[in-house]
Amino acid sequence: MDAWVRFSAQSQARERLCRAAQYACSLLGHALQRHGASPELQKQIRQLEGHLSLGRKLLRLGNSADALESAKRAVHLSDVVLRFCITVSHLNRALYFACDNVLWAGKSGLAPRVDQEKWAQRSFRYYLFSLIMNLSRDAYEIRLLMEQESSACSRRLKGSGGGVPGGIETGGLGGPGTPGGGLPQLALKLRLRVLLLARVLRGHPPLLLDVVRNACDLFIPLDKLGLWRCGPGIVGLCGLVSSILSILTLICPWLRLKP
Amino acid sequence: MDAFTRFTNQTQGRDRLFRATQYTCMLLRYLLEPKAGKEKVVMKLKKLESSVSTGRKWFRLGNVVHAVQATEQSIHATDLVPRLCLTLANLNRVIYFICDTILWVRSVGLASGINKEKWRTWAARHYYYSLLLSLGRDLYEISLQMERVAHSRAKREKSSPQDPLEYSVADEETEWLQSFLLLLFQALKQHPPLLLDTVKNFCDILNPLDQLGIYKSNPGIIGLGGLVSSIAGMITVAYPQMKLKTP
């Protein structure tokens, strides 16, 4: 009980719970439609989803300031690439929340002349940019870690006397090898690279969580902007998975990726 | 901006801010409604008030657990009167949150067979009881504080003897009232959390008094009371040392 009290005392936690519920409703609605459930039940689920969506917009009303604060903090990072990616991502998030606030004003009747479609498209565009920046940052971190891991591996092999020829160094090009054995060598290199990636991600759960979360989130704006229509079922499932993962990072703060 | 972020990161901080907005809208509507030519503004205020009020329900979902935990904590209070008052107040809060959750279920359309009026009256009644008991506890603490201040003043007067004042019988009553008010003022000045809690509970009780028909006031007074109590609540969130603690 104490854990729930502490968890729900954070406003972000409540918003994530509402998000998980909203995408669960969307997934449930899609499943019910596929299996031909009663239209009344479908209407109820859709109504609940609408209430959740509007409620979340209200819960998010102060988040622009939060995103701007995070952007301000990120400007002081030492690594140039990280600094760029994280700052731009937070700035885009701030703009996304600002568009979301305008949508809330429109939906709640304060500014009835707001063009809902235009502002919704704008907000999803900013959301997409911020997710792309997050994924670039994740890719950069993965690449750094893979280089570290492969150089550590090669050092260990050299230290244990006699390296394996044509070795595990996946970072560099192959040696002046035989042109005839090109394709199997490429396949081997690819396989080793994938293994290294798996090893890096297994050893860094926060990074893995962040990659999966951003990848799942990516489907939502791609679908809403019409770039890649995946259907409400996939959008609901991806939204639910990413909400559960972000709730996990709130419950266990060590799972959060620190810049 | 950092302080604002830290404040709004807490659910209660955000909720109090929205509550203040909601009651400000109520107050402004009451003030602007009789004026001509302000219909659009009044309509917008009404829409803002209703959407904030609906949205705040999401902040209250799950607060049953908070109230149950508060009940468990108040059972361990040392003094008898606060223990009794707070435990009963928190129990009433639990029932209020249960009624509130049922009203929420009705408002999102999940269960249409719920009698909204009945549950709303129940919620208001139990909210009223919990505020009444909290005020009882506040009055008890104020009387304790006043005793303490009176004792310390008596001790100071004994150590520094003065000439006895001469006064007539007619002055005795006003003298008593004056010294009572002075004692009350000093007691509250030395104990700001108690003052804040008393003001908050007193302002909050105006709403259920109106809803239950015990003391009908107008939306302006309810709006002002709600605004003042929300500001008091925001102060206790921003400065946790201002929250009234139960020893």
Image (tube, helix red, strand yellow):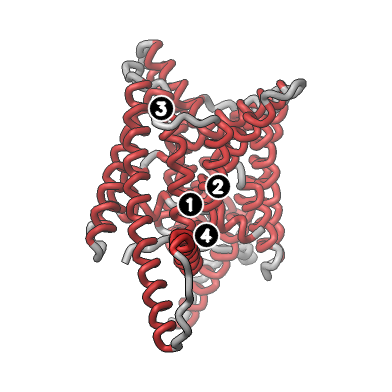
* Marker disc for residue B199: 1
Amino acid found under the numbered disc labelled 3: Gly
* Front disc: 1 or 4: 1
* Front disc: 2 or 4: 2
Which sits earlier in the primary sequence, circle 3 or circle 2?
3
Left or right of B104? Residue A76 is right
Name the residue furthest front. Answer: B168
Q: Picture coordinates of residue A181 (x, y %)?
A: 56, 55
* Marker disc for residue B213: 3
Q: Picture coordinates of residue A60 (x, y %)?
A: 57, 42
Amino acid found under the numbered disc labelled 4: Leu
Q: Closest to the observer: A203 or A187?
A: A203
Q: Which residue is mark 2?
A: B228
Amino acid found under the numbered disc labelled 1: Val
Question: Which residue is rendered at x = 58% and y = 55% of the image?
Answer: A138
Question: Which residue is rendered at x = 39% and y = 25% of the image?
Answer: A28
Which sits earlier in the primary sequence, circle 1 or circle 2?
1
The quarter holding residue B122 reads: top left
